[in-house]
Amino acid sequence: HRFKSAIGAFLATMLATAVFDLTQAILIGLGLSALSFMVRASAVAVERKEIDVKALQAIGHQIESVHPDMSVVYVTGPMFFGAAAKLRSEFAKHDCERFVILSMRGVPHIDVSGLELIEEIWEKQRKCGGELLLAAVQPAVREMLDRSRLTTEIGAHNFFWSADRAILAANARVSG
């Protein structure tokens, strides 16, 4: 199952070699491989979860409750132009929350479309009095955020090592 698209491209290239000349077959194979890559690269998973206080307590955090208007959004996959529409639609489904924690541990790369999306989310949160916190940002993604000056705009104090650290910080901001 993992190699279905690669095997399909290979077989199509072999068939094209028999039907067309070698140059056309190579171009067909290259085109199919590029298409397969684009489909895989745009595959991003977005999962919004409510915060489980019992799970936080189980890993040793001293917390009794969390702010009711807080959620964690786990993003997995590269934030490229192909995935931006899916992410945008996920965030459009929800009204403004006091805290949105964007956990990006599974985001290895980001492009300009991804940066624009994060800026849109941040602007939406800011306009309605909410906050955007980013957790588990990979070094390559952090570098892009720094280069685009989004780190400065969002504030370095809103970046956290993990989602649970962001949850604890957000909770402290409300109660403190």
Image (cartoon, rainbow, N blue to C red):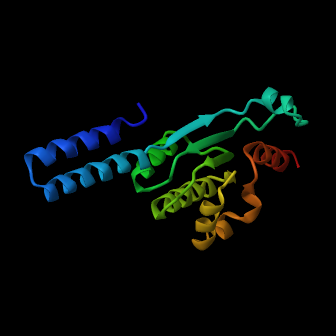
Against 50, residue 162 (above or below) is below
Q: Position of residue 98 (x, y in %)?
A: 68, 46
- Answer with left or right where residue 121 lies relative to residue 63: left
Against 57, residue 94 (above or below) is below
- Answer with left or right where residue 135 lies relative to residue 165: left
Location of residue 70 (image quadrant): top right
Q: Residue at x 80, y 47 (%)?
A: 165
State which quarter of the image contains the N terminus: top left
Count of numbered marks: 0
Q: Residue at x 74, y 64 (%)?
A: 156
Nearest the viewer among 144 and 70 is 144
Q: Residue at x 63, y 70 (%)?
A: 146
Q: Residue at x 81, y 49 (%)?
A: 169
Q: Position of residue 134 (x, y in %)?
A: 67, 53
- Answer with left or right where residue 59 lies relative to residue 130: right
Against 71, residue 35 (above or below) is below
Nearest the viewer among 101 and 7 is 7
Q: Position of residue 61 (x, y in %)?
A: 88, 37
Nearest the viewer among 19 and 130 is 19
Q: Position of residue 79 (x, y in %)?
A: 50, 53
Nearest the viewer among 27 and 86 is 27
